[in-house]
Image: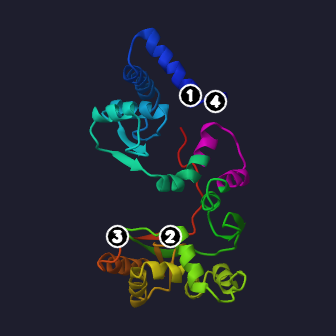
Amino acid sequence: MKLFTSKKIKEWELQTCHKQNISEIDLVNLAATEFVKWFLEKSNHQNILIIAGSGNNGSDAISIFSKLKSQRNVNLLLFNYPEVSDIQKTLLSYTTLENIHQLSVENLMHMLPNVLIGMDALFDLKIARSELMAIGATLGADVPFAIMGNVAIGRGHGDQLNSVLSRGNYLWVLAFSNQGLSTPAVYKECDRLRAGMNIANPTINDSLLQALASGDAKLLGKSLVNDLQAAACSLKPSLRLILDVGSEYGALGSIVSGSGPTVAFLVSDQDHALDLTVALSGSGVVSNAISVNAPVSGAKIIESF
């Protein structure tokens, strides 16, 4: 497959506009009309997700969205809004804002594992999962694990992974905050709190591995440790209040996730999860609380076209 640069595609578009004596917006709408006609003939999918980037194809995506949404349930993810082109702004002015969602760089990072898996399937590349993980590591330290899934030990920046034996499933309650924490700031605060201390090199937590291997949820809860938790709580004291709610409602274990501000609570069963979720939601110190099961598999294709 030959790929062309956005600059080259833009040149061709301008040449077409000049030859046919039409505007760029007219060209975009004509192309979108033909694509939607083809799509409706070929596909029965009712739930459609369209991502509009900041390049040439972003304008096509917006026009396709506006023409397709009357026929199917369509959502548009708009990347880097409001820093979009003038053509995109004009096209957006022609449609209602319903089902249009802004996509930030931070949100895009969470989508990268799905993008890699999806591109591999879409173009039938047959790239090995290990190679996709290596590619993902160049994009972000969290990406390889999201591709691998299940349970693993992470070394280096967290991108060098080894599978861990784990029995059973565990129920967690996740508490989210409205305002985030800067990861560099949390690491800097960690360094400040540790100044002058003799810090040993990190080692694998044997009790944690034993808990996972035996499926012992209580031991797992007691074995949870996060070296960044003190720093995160120092920068965001309300995290301590969230952790206190978990203790009050008998969580098997409580831990700040990574550099925060999300807090994870290990619970015993669905009733326990419901009680804690309701308590956290009514505490006034979290924006949302949900229960999730773990471990889960990595990113995968759940429906093929």
Q: Which one is nearer the viewer's eye here, 273 or 160? A: 160
**Residues at badges 3 and 2 in contact (C-beta under 8 Å)?**
no
Q: Which residue is mark 4?
A: 3
Q: Which one is nearer the viewer's eye here, 207 or 243? A: 243
Which mark is first along the chain, 2 or 1? Answer: 1
Which mark is first along the chain, 2 or 4? Answer: 4
Which mark identifies residue 287?
Answer: 3
SS for dot 1: helix
Can you see residue 226? no
SS for dot 2: strand
Amino acid carrying label 3: it is: Ser
**Residues at badges 1 and 3 in contact (C-beta under 8 Å)?**
no
Q: Residue at x 58, y 45 (%)?
A: 118
Which mark identifies residue 293?
Answer: 2
> Is residue 133 rendered magenta in the image?
yes
Q: Position of residue 18 (x, y in %)?
A: 45, 12
Residue interval drawn in magenta: 117-136
Q: Position of residue 147 (x, y in %)?
A: 62, 57
